[in-house]
Image (cartoon, rainbow, N blue to C red):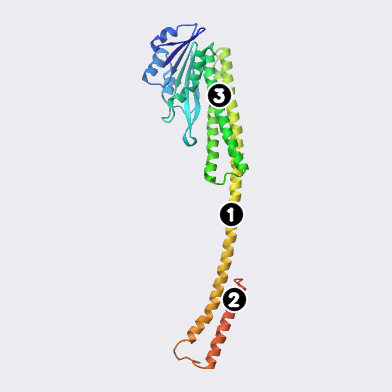
Amino acid sequence: MDVLLVDGLGVERHDADELPTLLKRDDALVWVDIPACDEPARSVLIEQFGFHWLAVRDCVERNHVSKFHVYADYLFVVLHAPKVGKRGHVHYVELDQFIGRNFLVTVHGPLNPAVDPAVAQLDTAAVLRRLEDGRFLPQSPFDLSHAIVSSLIRREIDLVAELAQQSGRLEQQVMLDEERDDPEAFIGKLFEIWYELLAVRTMAVHSNATYAGLAKRTRTTPETGTQLLADAADQFELVKTMADGQREFLHGVIECYQTRISTHMTIAAEKVATVSVRQNDDMRRISAWVAIVAVPTAVTGFFGQNVSFPGFGTAAGAVASAVLMVVMALVLYVAFRHKDWL
């Protein structure tokens, strides 16, 4: 873990065993950043700081929603930042904070093995660089916490902007009718971005509720601290609004694309149906003519037998067979015409 002492001269690094002495100082701010809440870190949280076991348990276990607890002399906050993984899956990268009178403890919650541990420390590392460069000098733990949370919010806004750019490119393809090669993959891309926006919005909603609740319930918090908490809540509300607007735009693109695909499918189905009807008509006509042609074949086959029957070998027999063929053919022709098969 990193144990940092921030005073008017800048930032200094210390060992964990110096914490009891550092926490007694009223002229400096102690910042402890814990990459993972393992057993040594858990002992520091309980023994050195005396944090409630429920809050420490929340640091050890994964939390699926943002939350906060108000204790007598410190606040405990759980936040999440988005990290887009493979195939649009959005990982919830957890950041836990203990904000006290003269200290801030940041704990990076358990991570999915698929997420690079460096991702969890992007915001704390960015603020630490500002401290070391002398570009930022917090006056209180709330200043330091607000800087870290603001960095997290900027990354969320950047992600929404990136997704908006991707949405714009896909919308252009829809409007220019350039997405016909693989409609299934294209609609998958649209829904993937829509889901990522939904995940960012959900995190922003939870975080906004958390900080809005903190700003209202922390009566012992300094006025500047309350203002910073309220400002963070407003920033999360802005992220939610931006994600909502982009989701609505993307929903319109999806509806437009689905309507276009449905129209194409309907037209194609009508063409197939027309061709099928034409083929059925042709088959009926062919079948009708085959039946008519089969009559002479059947009659001549009967009268051509090498057996004796009335009229065999006589002119009357020939006339009778000819008349029979014509009559039967005419009867079939009239019947098929009546059924509109010819």
Q: Is mark 3 on a helix, strand or loop?
A: helix
CA gap, disc 3 and disc 1: 48 Å
Type of the residue with mark 2:
Ala
The residue that mark 2 highlights is 335
Q: Which residue is drawn at 59% across and 77% down?
A: 333
Q: Using the image as rendered, state which of residue 302 and residue 58 is in the foreground.
A: 302
Type of the residue with mark 3:
Arg
Q: Using the image as rendered, state which of residue 2 and residue 213 is in the foreground.
A: 2
Q: Do the residues labelled 3 and 1 touch (CB within 8 Å)?
A: no
Circle nearer the viewer, 1 or 2 = 1
Q: What element carries label 1?
A: helix
Residue 154, which numbered label? Answer: 3
Q: In which quarter of the image is residue 53?
A: top left
CA gap, disc 3 and disc 2: 82 Å
Locate the N terminus by quadrant: top left
The residue that mark 1 highlights is 268
Q: Which residue is drawn at 52% across and 45% down?
A: 184
